[in-house]
């Protein structure tokens, strides 16, 4: 199987091209490295009436997570008294429609009571100061200024598309390295070749643009309320989407066209925000189903691929699975969930996260109301089919506004979703390299720091880094003063590390990519610079074996901000890595240490990333990870001696979903 379905193509008369148009010149397509190609994007002219009015750049306000973030408020959640035993019994799942959707309700405010920025707002202007670092961090401290325009090699190193077929094991895969003993110069990562050395790009004639529908006519006799038009949402890259028309097309189109429409819409969102160029064909549900079947035969894992589209008056669920045994017919099902507006779904997610995040409520189960409601909307409609198909893994491609759900903590009234299934998130199937590689012989580059200027300390980091190599994995580890950008670049350039582990702060914020960052020892690397570094190191080039996994063990994503979601969920696309393991919010240092130690243990035994994450989350949920007498006890029976700063974790109950449900696997789940 070739990795991924990177693509850019209209899909005939039902194409989403009917819903998209440019308000700025299209970027030229470059860097195509796939066998599946498509014509250059077509500039589609829409009637002026459909253009959204210009709006002024909004001022970037403080991070909505600030108000309840215990690290930044000066409150140490780990000095709390040990929580009382959880109350017995679980709340029954709320019934369908127990809370009528409020008409005209606004999307929920962030966790710090900041309302999300309005859909359709343009990104901040060039040169605008990025948002203040969580309200208490010195703005700009150690932060690299955004690169100038034109410095990024356009489209360099896109991953080739998948054909939906898995090659025999070993074919096209990275040969397993020896136990850390490589001959000098062997296995060094090659920089991307010059543009003229790349595969020539076929020049295809663009298809004629689809006929545009006339703007809707309004009757003078219509009531004033009925004449209101839904706003046209604007993507950060300058393209606009007629959201009501998109939703209507999903509801009315054939199920196969609906899948391709969602795939293309997701790619448009990520392409425009990340400013990457995508090529190839839209994967059909038949290709997705066959690919899932190929992976099932290789990994013995049954996977359901689930699209969740949040629409104005309902949710639309589409599930693709592998063909049944002895049957080559692709399996796809549709589950419309009426009575659940987009606003109501987003509001429920915000309430759910705030209940999980609030340190004063960790001895309660107040979160169950929201966990069960979301389960009823997103999972319950297909629960019987999942059980009948013996599904092991649920892989979600979520609509904007839904990508920061801690899916593992959804609850059916008896148990958490993670107790039944392993759960992963992808930007879309076409944007994911789904090929399977056993990574147990892959070298690890682990780096991090326990101290920063102007950011909370992470005292468990030295132990987190060193414990990876005691499991044992092989590779290189660097902490504190050695965790510099120059050292990272040097190490990554001279050896093919398949796993990159960064134990450091990372923030995914609204606005431009330059606003979000990964913190090195004394320097912030914003996501635009991270993208350029990945291209420099050849991560996005087919000339080099891919990075199988990037771990960010201490990151968080602003709640209710669709652009922050795109940065978090699109990091694998941006950097060229196959999978990213990150957290939706900051988790206590001891719990992170426990979960990461469990993860690398389970990944050695069961080299399926999503299953290793599930086993790690279950270890915390089931009380198998605990702090006692200055030691961290793991489910494996091993112990880690904790530094004095972490002794205060003794008595903390890590079974609360705050401690384990934030960790999310994005991209390749195999």
Image: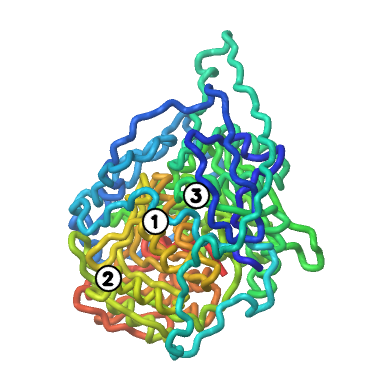
Residue 88: image tag: none
- In the rendered image, which quarter contains the C terminus? bottom right
Q: Which residue does the image show at 56% across and 50% down from the upper left?
A: 378
Return the disc, 3 or 1, that comes first in the chain's sequence.
3
Select label 1 or label 2 by which is in front: 2
Q: Is residue 160 left or right of residue 628?
A: right
Query: Would you say residue 429 is visible in this rendering?
Result: no
Category of crowding for the residue at label 3, using alpha-carbon neighbours closer than 10 angstroms: few (below 14), some (14–19), many (at least 20): many
Above or below, comparing residue 513 to residue 653 in the picture: above
In the figure, residue 492 lies in which quadrant? bottom left
Category of crowding for the residue at label 1, using alpha-carbon neighbours closer than 10 angstroms: few (below 14), some (14–19), many (at least 20): some
Q: Nearer the viewer, residue 137 or 560?
A: 137
Q: x, y (%) of residue 475? A: 40, 83
Q: Which residue does the image show at 52% across and 58% down from the upper left?
A: 425
Give the labeled residue for mark 2: 484
Give the labeled residue for mark 1: 365
Give the labeled residue for mark 3: 270
Contact? badges 3 and 1 (CB < 8 Å)? no
Above or below, comparing residue 287 to residue 106 in the picture: below
Q: x, y (%) of residue 434? A: 59, 65
Query: Would you say residue 38 is visible in this rendering?
Result: yes
SS for callout 1: loop
Return the disc, 3 or 2, that comes first in the chain's sequence.
3
Q: Is residue 164 left or right of residue 338?
A: right
Q: Which residue does the image show at 46% across and 57% down from the upper left?
A: 574
């Amino acid at each position: 199987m070739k990795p991924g379905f990177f693509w850019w193509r209209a899909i005939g008369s039902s194409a989403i091209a009917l819903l998209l148009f440019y308000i700025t010149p299209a970027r030229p397509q470059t860097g195509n490295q796939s066998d599946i190609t498509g014509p250059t994007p077509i500039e589609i002219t829409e009637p002026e009436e459909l253009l959204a009015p210009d709006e002024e750049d909004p001022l970037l306000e403080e991070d909505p997570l600030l108000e309840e973030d215990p690290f930044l408020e000066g409150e140490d959640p780990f000095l709390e008294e040990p929580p009382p035993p959880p109350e017995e019994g679980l709340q029954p799942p709320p019934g369908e429609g127990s809370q009528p959707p409020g008409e005209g309700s606004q999307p929920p405010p962030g966790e710090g009571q900041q309302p999300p920025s309005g859909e359709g707002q343009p990104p901040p202007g060039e040169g605008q100061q990025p948002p203040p670092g969580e309200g208490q961090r010195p703005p700009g401290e150690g932060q690299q200024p955004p690169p100038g325009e034109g410095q990024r090699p356009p489209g360099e190193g896109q991953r080739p598309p998948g054909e939906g077929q898995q090659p025999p094991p070993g074919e096209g895969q990275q040969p397993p390295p020896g136990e850390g003993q490589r001959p000098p110069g062997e296995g060094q990562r090659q920089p991307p070749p010059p543009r003229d050395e790349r595969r020539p790009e076929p020049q295809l004639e663009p298809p004629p643009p689809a006929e545009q529908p006339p703007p809707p006519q309004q009757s003078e006799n219509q009531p004033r309320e009925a004449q209101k038009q839904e706003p046209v949402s604007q993507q950060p890259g300058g393209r606009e989407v007629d959201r009501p028309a998109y939703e209507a097309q999903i509801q009315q189109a054939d199920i196969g066209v609906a899948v391709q429409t969602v795939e293309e819409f997701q790619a448009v969102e990520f392409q425009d925000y990340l400013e990457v160029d995508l090529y190839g064909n839209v994967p059909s549900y038949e290709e997705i189903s066959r690919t899932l079947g190929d992976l099932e035969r290789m990994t013995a894992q049954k996977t359901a691929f689930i699209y969740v589209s949040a629409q104005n008056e309902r949710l639309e669920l589409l599930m693709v699975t592998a063909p049944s045994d002895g049957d080559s017919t692709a399996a796809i099902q549709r589950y419309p969930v009426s009575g659940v507006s987009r606003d109501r779904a987003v509001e429920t997610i915000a309430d759910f996260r705030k209940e999980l995040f609030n340190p004063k409520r960790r001895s309660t189960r107040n979160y169950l109301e929201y966990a069960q409601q979301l389960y009823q909307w997103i999972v319950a409609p297909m629960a019987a089919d999942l059980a009948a198909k013996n599904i092991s893994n649920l892989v979600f491609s979520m609509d904007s506004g839904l990508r920061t759900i801690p899916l593992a903590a959804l609850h059916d009234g008896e148990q958490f979703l993670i107790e039944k299934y392993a759960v992963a998130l992808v930007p879309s199937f076409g944007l994911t390299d789904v090929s399977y590689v056993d990574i147990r012989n892959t070298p690890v580059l682990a780096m991090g720091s326990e101290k920063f200027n102007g950011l909370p300390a992470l005292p468990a980091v030295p132990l987190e880094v060193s414990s990876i190599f005691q499991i044992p994995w092989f590779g290189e580890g660097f902490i504190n003063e050695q965790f510099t950008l120059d050292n990272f670049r040097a190490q990554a350039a001279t050896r093919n590390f398949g796993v990159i582990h960064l134990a450091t702060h990372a923030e995914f914020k609204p606005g431009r990519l330059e606003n979000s960052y990964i913190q090195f020892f004394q320097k912030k690397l914003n996501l635009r610079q991270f993208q350029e570094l990945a291209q420099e190191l050849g991560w996005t080039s087919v000339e080099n074996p891919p990075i199988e996994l990037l771990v960010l063990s201490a990151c968080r994503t602003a709640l209710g901000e669709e652009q922050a979601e795109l940065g978090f969920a699109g990091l694998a696309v941006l950097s060229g890595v196959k999978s990213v393991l990150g957290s939706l919010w900051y988790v206590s240092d001891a719990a992170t240490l426990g979960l990461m130690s469990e993860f690398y243990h389970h990944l050695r035994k069961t080299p399926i990333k999503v299953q290793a994450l599930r086993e790690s989350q279950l270890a915390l949920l089931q009380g198998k990870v605990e702090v006692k007498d200055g030691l961290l006890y793991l489910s494996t029976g091993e112990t880690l001696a904790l530094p004095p700063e972490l002794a205060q974790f003794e008595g903390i109950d890590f079974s609360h979903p705050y401690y384990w449900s934030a960790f999310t696997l994005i991209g390749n789940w195999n």
